[in-house]
Image (cartoon, helix red, strand yellow):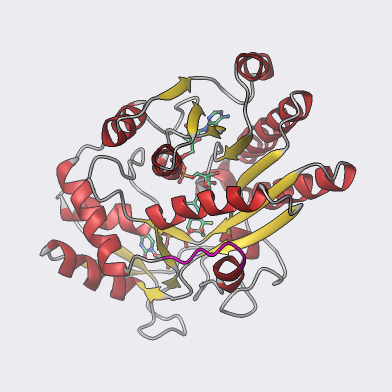
Amino acid sequence: MNVLITGGAGYIGSHTSLEFLQAGYNVTVIDNLCNSKQESLIRVQEICGKDITFYQNDLLDSAALDKIFKQNSFDAVIHFAGLKAVGESVEKPLLYYNNNLTGTLNLLECMQRHNVKKIVFSSSATVYGNPLKVPITEELSTQPTNPYGRTKLMIEDILKDLYISDPDWDIALLRYFNPIGAHHSGKIGEDPNGIPNNLLPYIAQVAVGKLPHLNIFGNDYPTIDGTGVRDYIHVVDLAKGHLKALEKLLTSPGVVTYNLGTGKGYSVIEIIEAFQQASGIEIPYKFTHRRAGDAAEIYADPTLANTDLKWTAQKDVLTMCKDTWNWQSHNPQGY
Ligand code: NAD
Ligand code: UFG
């Protein structure tokens, strides 16, 4: 079976490409490398001893996309390619709307032209915005609070409209919670550009001495210790969720939406403690003001994915931190 993975050189895409190769799929990746390096794919191939067909192309280039679809015969698409930094999306909304929406529209038009009608889309828990209750089920109202989140919700709506127009499509909308960790080999992992926005890459860079201390954004939230609570999920568990989602699409379910999370929330302080235990390194931190737009507590109810996909996140927070540290300590400068 031939799978096209857009954004496959990125953090989640590289781990997912590996899982698909190991499960026996043929993998083709399209990535413009705007937030990744081809080295990630070289290492994926080293880990599993299988080849990836790689095209360095932009989804905004529909002629190039069409050529790739003519040269290959894809059975399904896993669509990761997109920009994902919340703060940057507030500063540069047009960049985000253009890249994420136009890129996806080009991809879908191309898929339609070539009669490829199965797609797994990387959505996000960010579509729920500041949730009215936790744990979050898929039916909870969606109200994203920033342009990035709105691109995710708009793409979900585009895909639902596409299905209404043509029920031959099968579409999985996967709403990820907070992916962290790395493959246990330590060869692939998260390699953000510049100073990380997200908690784990920041902690990991403090641990290797690239950053002096962690700023904790708020200690006055109504949570167990006053710091923000999130549902951290191991990136390999998340990658395996895509295999299960594609298997589901092969049963022609139409449009399906799943939360991919563990169902458990951890505070920033609890994560620091787990990381310290995993690495044996003390993480200095300072409390600072809340970050604009942050919610107190976000965690999934993953029951639907557990039952429908027969998928459950397996790896605990200590393993996530150990694998993050294994990757970061062996690759202090990233790829
Ligand atoms: P990433 O930045 O590591 O990967 C995205 C990849 O897409 C990068 O390799 C980038 O070069 C590529 N890309 C971006 N725009 C492109 C374009 N126009 N054409 C071709 N390639 C393009 O991010 P990630 O963390 O692996 O996230 C993958 C997907 O999952 C994204 O859609 C993201 O919004 C979504 N997501 C991520 C998180 C998270 O916390 N990491 C949470 C929820 C959802
Ligand atoms: N935090 C800090 N200091 C930091 C970074 C984060 O205290 O330097 C705190 C945040 O306030 C929050 C928690 O750590 O309480 C997690 O923050 P992240 O930035 O790692 O993750 P978010 O939950 O804010 O958002 C991430 C992605 C979004 C995605 C969301 C859900 O950035 O794009 O997970 O999937 F939508």
Q: Position of residue 182 (x, y in %)?
A: 31, 50
Q: Residue furthest right?
A: 165
Quadrant (top left/top right/bottom left/bottom right) for the C terminus: top left
Does the magenta segment cover residue 311? yes
Quarter of the figure with residue 168: top right
Main secondary structure of the magenta stretch: loop
Q: In the picture shown, does residue 45 fall above or below 189? A: above
Q: In this orientation, which residue lies closer to the viewer: 290 or 242?
A: 242
Q: In the picture shown, does residue 115 fall above or below 121? A: above
Residue occupying the point 64% across, 13% down: 67
Residue occupying the point 48% across, 30% down: 27
Q: Position of residue 176 (x, y in %)?
A: 53, 58
Q: Position of residue 7 (x, y in %)?
A: 50, 34
Q: Position of residue 83 (x, y in %)?
A: 54, 39
Quadrant (top left/top right/bottom left/bottom right) for the N terminus: top right
The boundaries of the magenta stretch are 308-313
For the image, the number of numbered tags is 0
Quarter of the figure with residue 258: bottom right
Question: Would you say 317 lies left or right of 167 here?
Answer: left
| Residue 176 in view here | yes
Q: In this orientation, which residue lies closer to the viewer: 21 or 226?
A: 21
Q: In this orientation, which residue lies closer to the viewer: 118 or 194?
A: 118
Does the magenta segment cover residue 316? no
Residue occupying the point 89% across, 42% down: 165
Question: Would you say 32 lies left or right of 70 here?
Answer: left
